[in-house]
Image: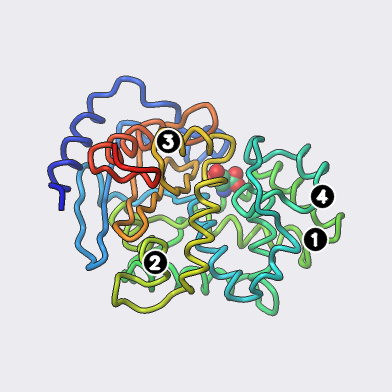
Amino acid sequence: MKDLQGIVLAIAERMAKEPDRGHVAQYIPELAKIDPNQFGIAVALADGNLFAAGDADTPFSIQSISKVFTLSLALGRVGDALWERVGREPSGDPFNSIVQLEADHGIPRNPFINAGAIVVTDVLLAGHQPRETIGEILRFMRHISEDDGIRIDPEVARSEERTGFRNAALANFIRAANNLRHAPEQTLGVYYHHCAIAMTCKQLAMAGRYFAFGGRLGVDGPKIVSSARARRINALMLTCGHYDGSGDFAFQVGLPGKSGVGGGILAIVPDVASVAVWSPGLNAVGNSTLATQALKMLSNRAGWSIFGET
Ligand code: GLU
């Protein structure tokens, strides 16, 4: 095994000196306040061993990273019937594109763009009150990260609720196309709350292990999803996990991954590790500038690209 602690420390040191840190998301007022000078990284292995550096214990808003977890839950609920309501193709358009949704007749292109994640949330809401669904998602996050301290940041959820006019437009359009079963504001309420889950890099790396280890939390850990499902969600992360920057992330890093506008990225090294990196400044397509750079360094140094060792 490589000297992972040495590698993550070297990455954090290098990132601390980077002058170009991107720009913190401005469209969610609560996120616009975050200090861009932060950087954290954590690598979780099958046995739960963690290698971490930088601000790996600072909670941040996981935002769209929550979508890989809600997708897991929704597939558990309705299985492949989900794919009648959401596609599996990369979008090539911004994450909140309204034009694309209209072209696709209200069937969102994939579960990771906002429109697709809103439909996934709508699936989870079936038969429940919004509060129960939020509770179910939070319990799931606590279970897979083995940490009962995980919380939702109510300020972030409120901030999104107050300003999410674009998401409201998407949800209303989906409803008009008969692909939303609940009132748009109900589904959006749950969506904003799961986006507002706050986690540290260490917690997130632990939570992502089931994608790396055939659906289990570690090699002998409890089964969370089937291995086929874990494999397929990894495929979606690779092709759709970084919005219209997905191709470039696969090119640069070579790992399935999911980013969020809070500046986090969860990356999966199949059969080896689950990695969480966070730095709040984003690039032009909404992915963390330094987290992407750090993952590129990590996958190079550890020889972890799924396309072959360097
Ligand atoms: N809650 C954010 C939104 O709906 C999620 C976007 C993201 O992380 O990419 O706009």
Q: Is residue 271 above or below residue 146?
A: above
Residue 288: which disc? Answer: 3
Q: Position of residue 84 (x, y in %)?
A: 75, 63
Q: Nearer the viewer, mark 4 or mark 1?
A: 1
Residue at the spot x=38%, y=72% of the render?
A: 216
Residue with the mark numbered 2: 210
- Ligand 1 resides in the quarter of the picture at top right
Q: For this rendering, which residue is in front, 309 or 17?
A: 309
The amino acid sitting under disc 3 is Ser
Q: Residue furthest front?
A: 308
Instruction: Answer left or right for 124 relative to 85.
Output: left
Local packing at callout 1 (Cα closer than 10 Å; few below 14, some 14-19, many 20+) is: many
Q: Secondary structure at mark 4?
A: helix
The amino acid sitting under disc 2 is Tyr
**CA gap, disc 2 and disc 3:** 23 Å
Q: Secondary structure at mark 1?
A: loop
Local packing at callout 3 (Cα closer than 10 Å; few below 14, some 14-19, many 20+) is: many
Q: Find out if the beta carbon at label 1 lies less than 8 Å from the nearest ligand 1 atom.
A: no
Q: Secondary structure at mark 3?
A: loop
**CA gap, disc 3 and disc 1:** 31 Å
Q: Tell me whether circle 2 and circle 3 mark residues in contact (CB < 8 Å).
A: no
**CA gap, disc 4 and disc 1:** 9 Å
Please tell me which of labels 3 and 1 falls first in the chain. Answer: 1
Residue 179: which disc? Answer: 1
**CA gap, disc 4 and disc 3:** 29 Å
Q: Secondary structure at mark 2?
A: helix
